[in-house]
Image (tube, rainbow, N blue to C red):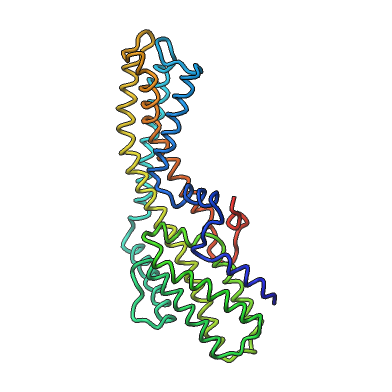
Amino acid sequence: MDASDFESDASETVGQEPGGPIDALRQWLLIDGNRVAIAVGISAAIGAVVYGLVVANYLAVGPGSYLPTLTGSGLTSGLLTLLTVTLSINQLILSRVFGSTDKLSDRLSGVVDFRDRVETIADVAATPSNPAEFLALVGETMVDRVERVRRTADPDPDLRSYLDAIEGYASELSDVRERSDSTRELLSTLLGPGYANNLVATERVRNEYEGDLPEEASDHLAAIHDLLKAVAVTRQFFKTLAIQQDLARLSRMLVYFGVPGLVTLFGLTLAYTRSTVSVPPALRIWVASVGLAVVSLPISVLVAYMLRVATVSLYSVSVGPFVPPEERSTD
């Protein structure tokens, strides 16, 4: 067994900080950033581009321009179609929330059984209901089990490297209590293949040291293995919650920004006709730029939220030790 394997696993732990400013910006844009702020930024950029093209005489906003056609038909139908997406999103959310009493009871029983298993391993009366506290308990219990393996066995360098790697991973899990204020932030710390690498490493250690370790140490390794599986289940459960919350927020934001967008679109259509423009010449460039920026807000909101939903889905596909190459990639 190569000790460097465990060192590489430990480097892929939860809560890992981005490697540089580009990585930090990328993570903020795709996962951590405020979706409304990103949407406003996208729309502001659209308005700035329109303004620049008008100043450069690539676009016309005076009498005889194609702006009335754009606002009167294309954008109006597109915006109305986008608003109907809200209904589809709500139906998707409700299909996950509603259910028969049997299905809801089975779902509740599964959650209770899962928590009971963690309580047994952690030797606590009850596990916390707060997601960050729950994950921190798993990490603290894992650290405790690592210490017990050290006390009950005489680890060689390879086993010591494995225990150090698991302890580092578990310590990061314990720290999420202080860093995570929401389900989405908590999930952000769990993305990537770190848990799967450590799960495979634990299975390898249990198989290679089978019969060589005291029974008590083997039991602690089995508990570590069960706790890593609990992390896998917890990650998928939190992913479901986070995506449902994001879709619910997206539905609400589409309504909030869609109605002003429609009003602005109607105003532009009435102000700009094929023959005359009721807007003073000095204000036309500003009305067109700001108006199109406001009209683009609903699609910008959709883009901002879909970026996060797609990213979270891509980097949390795996449920066990099988990790697709896409989840390991940083592209």
Q: Position of residue 67 (x, y in %)?
A: 41, 18
Query: Residue 17 versus residue 278: which sits nearer the camera?
Result: 17
Q: Residue at x 46, y 58 (%)?
A: 188
**Residue 194 image position (x, y, % from top left):** 56, 65
The quarter of the rendered structure image containing the N terminus is bottom right
Residue drawn at (50%, 19%) of the image: 56
Front residue of 64/113: it is: 64
Q: Between residues 119 and 185, which one lies in front from this camera angle?
A: 185
**Is residue 172 found left or right of 83 in the rendered image?**
right
* Front one among 154 and 230: 154
Image height of 67 relative to 127, above or below? above
Q: Is residue 45 above or below residue 178?
A: above
Q: Which residue is located at x 46 percent, y 19 percent?
A: 54
Name the residue at the right extreme: 1
Q: Hey, which residue is sitting farthest top in the picture?
A: 275
Residue 39 found in image quarter: top left
Count the numbered circles shown: 0
Which percent across, then down, holds residue 128? 34, 72
Residue 111 percent location from the top left of the image: 38, 69
